[in-house]
Image (cartoon, rainbow, N blue to C red):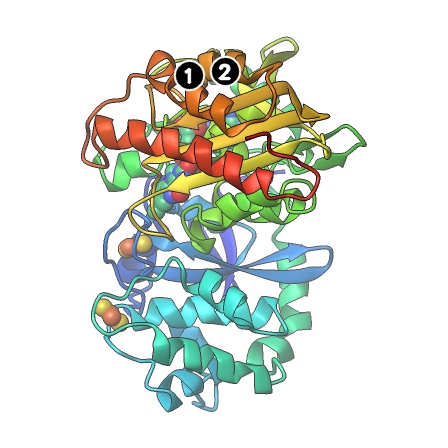
Amino acid sequence: MVSSSIKFIYNNKICRIENSDPNKTVLDYIRNDLKKNGTKEGCAEGGCGACTVVLGELKDKKIIYKSINSCISFLPSIDGKQLILVENLISKKNKLHPIQNAMVKFHGSQCGFCTPGFVMSLFAMYKNHTKFNEEIIEETLSGNLCRCTGYRPIIDAAKSLNNKKGNDHFKRDQKKIINLLKRINNNELEISYRNKKYYSPKTLSNLKKIIRKNPKSNFLSGGTDLSLEVTKLRGEIDNIISLNSVKELKFVKKKKKFIEVGAGVSLYDFQNIIKSYYLDFYNILKRYGSVQIRNVGTIAGNIATASSIGDTLPLLLSLDSIVKIQTKSSIRIIPLNEFFLSYRKTKLKKGDFIYSVIIPINKQNHFKAYKISKRFDDDISNVCASFNLMIKKNKIVEAKIAYGGMSEIPRRALAIEKKLTNSIFTEEVFFKAQNLIKKDFSPIDDMRASKNYRIEIAKNLLMKFFYEISTKKNIRVNQ
Ligand SMILES: Cc1cc2nc3c(=O)[nH]c(=O)nc-3n(C[C@H](O)[C@H](O)[C@H](O)COP(=O)(O)OP(=O)(O)OC[C@H]3O[C@@H](n4cnc5c(N)ncnc54)[C@H](O)[C@@H]3O)c2cc1C
Ligand code: FES
Ligand code: FES
């Protein structure tokens, strides 16, 4: 069934919004229509966390709580979900939530602008985890920026939650909410608002039909790039086809020699899948934006954006990944290495969408990746480098090396790869190879970094890789 109204759960009730502007953000709806002003607008581009709200979603008959940046989420994205605002944390008996109590007790409530966002990020953590160690707390707070006081009281408040048993009124209402969520999860959404259209099909076959009728539409995955056309550039997007509800795109196939990740898998879910294959991939993803960004952003969106500083791209390139593209008539398989054409241009034609990405698994290879950015968390790379070497008996048999931030598209370092391949794994060879960086890349000066800085960093990362893997037991370094 197709419906034109956005249905969601708010305050334990089903709410409906009829034919709303699909470019309206969740934040604008909350503040201007619901008149709930606890949620704040800071940057309006996903960077500060002041607008954090939580969405409850059904997964395997359980509710998963996802913190999101409401400032860059289009309103239809709450369809089929539970919307939880900071105002909803107080119980009907007017009691503060355990998170709020902890923030009061440990003086974590510092300024009125950021505190609601901090509270909502901690709320999602409280609901999704049972133990709160430093790693989980730091990850949880990585998308909430404080510039006034610091994080210690907030971290102390979060640690104190370890003594609580996860009880709150959301736990008590859980069964009721699950039943309500089931009731609103059946329909496909199709909104017509003035000259704008928004489609959210649930199946691949319906998606294909909609694309055939609307070939010039924009695909929406997490919206962490696309929505900024509205919130930052003040533009309008007339036709949107959301890929988020297509179940067939939310899959992970694990095989011995590769894993295949569907376009609809969020970066947050992907980080936990890739961890057991490539630890450094996981480490880079943990520094990708914030939990709020990774909860909605997808690996397919990162690939389609084709940004020179897209963090997953050099890693996927050095792993020799392959993209599966759904064209009008068939599935096309393209090595990622051939996918990027020029600045933000790819082999995707209008109406084509990324179906999945295939990542080869080669556990005996030496794989490492590094992200250099001004801030550790929630920042875009200046340079991102990824190295994937097969070494046999101290000889480099295969070298796959890619850099982001060094040219208009993320690219393999072919001259360096050639120099290393079939060489003995020695410091001298790497010293010679690093001087080829200028043959491979001619980076630009921009607000993030100068050309010379990028070149030096790229050279140093190659040497860092050498020193790090040469300290591994199985590699003998010939001096
Ligand atoms: C605060 C903030 C922090 C960020 N931090 C980082 C970071 O650390 N590292 C980094 O690399 N990026 C970062 N980004 C950029 C952003 O997260 C990426 O570009 C992201 O991967 C986009 O994915 P998405 O699913 O949100 O795509 P969307 O925004 O939904 O789409 C992006 C583009 O891809 C197209 N598209 C989406 N899915 C498909 C598909 N399946 N097939 C074909 N086309 C598709 C859309 O039409 C659109 O043109 C950040 C963004 C913000 C706002
Ligand atoms: S207002 Fe800053 S992240 Fe939304
Ligand atoms: S808590 Fe708002 S700037 Fe520090």
Circles 1 and 2: CB atoms closer than 8 Å: yes
Name the residue carrying label 2. 351
Residue 147 falls in image quadrant:
bottom left
Kind of element beneath mark 1: loop
x then y, percent, for residue 71: 32, 51
Mark 1 belongs to which amino acid?
Lys
Residue at 45% across / 18% down in the picture? 413
x then y, percent, for residue 305: 41, 27
Mark 2 belongs to which amino acid?
Gly
Kind of element beneath mark 2: loop
x then y, percent, for residue 375: 31, 51
Of all residues, the one furthest to the front in this rendering is 479
* View quadrant of ligand 2: bottom left
Q: Earlier in the sequence, mark 1 or mark 2?
A: 1
Mark 1 nearby-residue class (10 Å; few <14, some 14–19, many ≥20): some
Q: Is residue 297 above or below residue 261?
A: below
The quarter of the rendered structure image containing the C terminus is top right
Taking depth in this image into account, of 362 and 218 the one nearest to the observer is: 362
Whether residue 57 sits left or right of residue 89 in the image: it is right
